[in-house]
Amino acid sequence: MQRSFLKWTLACGLAAAPSFFIAMSLVHRTGYAAACGGMIAGTAVFVVLYGFVERTQRVQRILSWRFAKRTAWIGYGTRIAASIIFPMGVFLDMICGLFSVGFSQWLLGNERFFVERDAAVHGEHVSVFANFLFTTVVQGLLLNVVLLGYMILCLASAIALPCSPSRVQQFDAHRPMAWHD
């Protein structure tokens, strides 16, 4: 179990890096600690969830299927690679981040989300922490929806690829003749 949490800490940490750097460039220096704490706590939510979900019998049964395991490796590997490759990871994180900040502002009623100098000066670090925690969780959910869509495409292609033209001919050779053949 410890290995699972270590794996997810590394994966989630690398995947969160572009968003972390974008957000930190928009926060006033007096709010850094609260903002960092909120983003780290939000990332930790996903580490814990992934760690526990991975250990369930249902997920273990699904991952025992060859195509599903390959799809998971491709999906999460691509996500981590996209985070490391500067423009691609930043673009994906920025789009999902803009949606999550907008949603958080709308839901929490905080229109001064990144203008935290006044909040930090007046000791409202709890508000800054809560805003960043909530937004990180919302962005993580959005990124997971995007990742799930990508992984469904990967799974479909992993299933379809073994059906190359030569495989189709093998299936056709064993197919019973229809009246119109």
Image: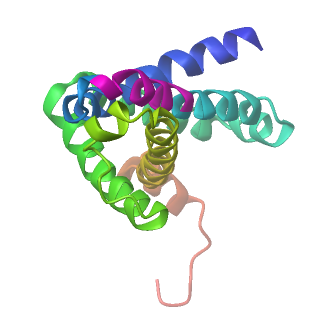
Main SS, magenta region, reads: helix
Taking the spot 44% from the left edge, 47% from the top edge, the residue there is 135
Dividing the picture into quarters, in which one does residue 178 lie?
bottom right
Residue lying at the far bottom of the rendered structure? 180
Tell me if 127 is positioned left or right of 67 in this view.
Answer: left
Taking the spot 58% from the left edge, 40% from the top edge, the residue there is 67
Image quarter of the N terminus:
top right
Residue 36 colored in magenta in the image:
yes
Place of residue 79 in the rendered image (x, y in percent of width and height, measured from the top left): 37, 33
Closer-to-camera residue (116/79): 116
Taking the spot 45% from the left edge, 31% from the top edge, the residue there is 39
Place of residue 119 in the rendered image (x, y in percent of width and height, measured from the top left): 36, 40
Q: How is the image coloured?
A: rainbow
Q: Vertically, is 126 above or below 142?
A: above
Q: Vertically, is 116 above or below 77?
A: below
Q: Vertically, is 49 above or below 6?
A: below
Closer-to-camera residue (58/15): 15
Residue 4 visible to an observer of this rendering: yes
Residue 68 colored in magenta in the image:
no
Closer-to-camera residue (105/62): 105
Q: Vertically, is 181 above or below 59?
A: below
Residue lying at the far right of the rendered structure? 57
Closer-to-camera residue (48/58): 48
Tell me if 48 is positioned left or right of 73 in this view.
Answer: right
Place of residue 180 in the rendered image (x, y in percent of width and height, measured from the top left): 48, 90
Taking the spot 45% from the left edge, 37% from the top edge, the residue there is 124
Dividing the picture into quarters, in which one does residue 168 lie?
bottom left
Residue 154 visible to an observer of this rendering: no
Magenta extent: 30-41
Place of residue 55 in the rendered image (x, y in percent of width and height, measured from the top left): 79, 29
